[in-house]
Image (tube, rainbow, N blue to C red):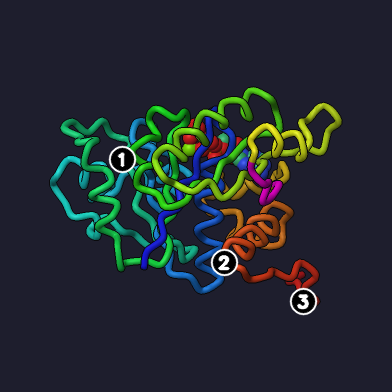
Amino acid sequence: MTKYIAIASGKGGVGKTTTSINLALALTNFGRDVILVDGNIHTPHIGIHLGSPLVPCSFHDVLAGDKKITEAIYLHPSGLRLIPGSIKLIEGINYEDIKKHIHSLNGHAEVVIIDCPPGFTDSLPILESSDETLLVVAPEISSVTDAIKTKVKAEELHSTVIGAIIVGSRKKDYEMSKESISSLLETPILSSIPFDEAVKKAQHLHHPVVYHAPFSASSTAYKELAGLLIGQGYDTNLKYKPS
Ligand SMILES: Nc1ncnc2c1ncn2[C@@H]1O[C@H](COP(=O)(O)OP(=O)(O)OP(=O)(O)O)[C@@H](O)[C@H]1O
Ligand SMILES: [Mg+2]
């Protein structure tokens, strides 16, 4: 059975795409059969992050009714399977059929990770297509209050909110604490992905940070998160690390 997980937020720019890519690759590296879908229809960024902004068949071509979704699956050199959007303006997108197209991936993967757009309005078809929702927040009040609305909408659409992750923490006193974020969102905090220069370097090279710098702080946190989601531990005290 294929499980669909939406990576959602309220506020934009909090790390959804970075999380979608790296969580999908970390799960792949744990041996799970994963497909990553760019569900950010208006401003798709997965192709930009991974160096394939224009592909012969994108998720937009599928939504325009020209292609089957299985024709839009690509393999990134990191081992990640993905369905990117197109940065071109493609007319004739049928938003009502998003769920139908995404669910055509049934049986083609164990886990489908879907990167949401910012805000809950544009995310509705993705939340509706997902069994579970993982909220992404920055450790600041505007991000958390906006995420509350997305959480309410996900629950209305019967997508189970499995928890939230904090992305980009610099461990400063002025940041919201894990406890306050969890209490406002009324959901557990599954991970805190630290602010990490390695994310920026990896993005510059069009690679997931889990691939480019697997022992960086952010990669370790993404691998721990993936391990948690599949009920498998990740040992951060590995004796062997490449020099
Ligand atoms: N852990 C991190 N450390 C440092 N920079 C990060 C980290 N995570 C994400 N970023 C940076 O933050 C910026 C926004 O990240 P990302 O594109 O993943 O956010 P988003 O929520 O998907 O944005 P949008 O709402 O526009 O789709 C990017 O420049 C990315 O490189
Ligand atoms: Mg994004």
Of helix, strand and loop, which mostly describes the magenta segment? Answer: strand
Say above or below: 170 vs 149.
Answer: below
Residue, disc 2? 230
| In the displayed structure image, the side of residue 95 where residue 207 appears, left or right | right
| In the displayed structure image, the side of residue 238 where residue 117 appears, left or right | left
User: Disc 3 marks which amino acid?
Assistant: Tyr
- Can residue 56 be seen in the rendering of this structure? no
Report the front residue among 103 and 65: 103
Q: Mark 1 or mark 3: which comes first in sequence?
A: 1
Report the front residue among 134 and 78: 134
Secondary structure found at label 3: loop
Where is residue 220 drawn, in percent x and y? 70, 59
As for residue 11 lying within the magenta part, the answer is no
Q: Mark 2 or mark 1: which comes first in sequence?
A: 1
The disc label shown at residue 86, or none:
1
Where is residue 240 drawn, in percent x and y? 77, 76
Q: Residue furthest bottom?
A: 239
